[in-house]
Amino acid sequence: MKTSSIAGRYQISVQPQGYQQAVMVKLVNLEQAGKAVADRASLQRYSAEMLNVISAGLDKNATDAANASRGTAGATFDVQRRFR
C-alpha cells in the first residue's frame, strides 16, 4: 500500500497569560495528494500533532537553557514535519 504525504499550513500565535504563554495553533490548509482534506477528525488530529511538536520543542529549549551555564537571549527550533 502506497501512502501519500500530508501537507498543512498553520497559523501559530503566542500570547502572554500572566506568567505563562498561551500557544494557539490554527490549521489553515490541509492537503493529501494535492486534494483538500476537510473531515473534522483529520483537521483536529493534525492540529493537535503540530501543537505537540511545538510543545516538545519549547520544552527542549527550556531544558537546554536551564542546563546551560549561561542563559541565551533566544532560541529557535524547526517545526517542519512530515505526517503519514
Image (cartoon, grey):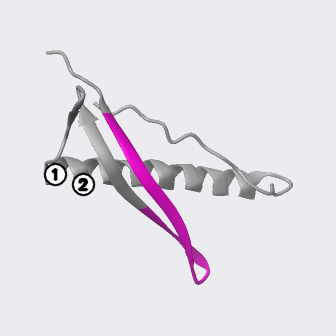
- Judge left or right: residue 13 versus residue 66: left
User: Where's residue 84, x and y in %?
Assistant: 27, 30
Task: Give the magenta range.
Answer: 7-24
Determine if the magenta segment contains residue 41: no
On the rendered structure, is 15 left or right of 73? left
The disc at residue 41 is 1
Residue type at tag 2: Gln
Compared to residue 60, the image places residue 20 above or below, namely below
Q: Are marks 1 and 2 in contact (CB under 8 Å)?
A: yes
Q: Amino acid at mark 1?
A: Ala
Q: Outermost residue toward the bottom?
A: 18
The residue where tag 2 is placed is 44
Comparing 7 with 81, the one in front is 7
In the displayed structure image, the side of residue 54 where residue 61 appears, left or right: right
Decide: few, some or many residues near mark 2? Use Cα within 10 Å; few <14, some 14-19, many ≥20: few
Quarter holding the N terminus is top left
Q: Main secondary structure of the magenta part?
A: strand
Residue 41: x %, y % from top left: 16, 51
Q: CA distance from mark 1 to mark 2?
A: 5 Å
Is residue 21 shown in magenta?
yes
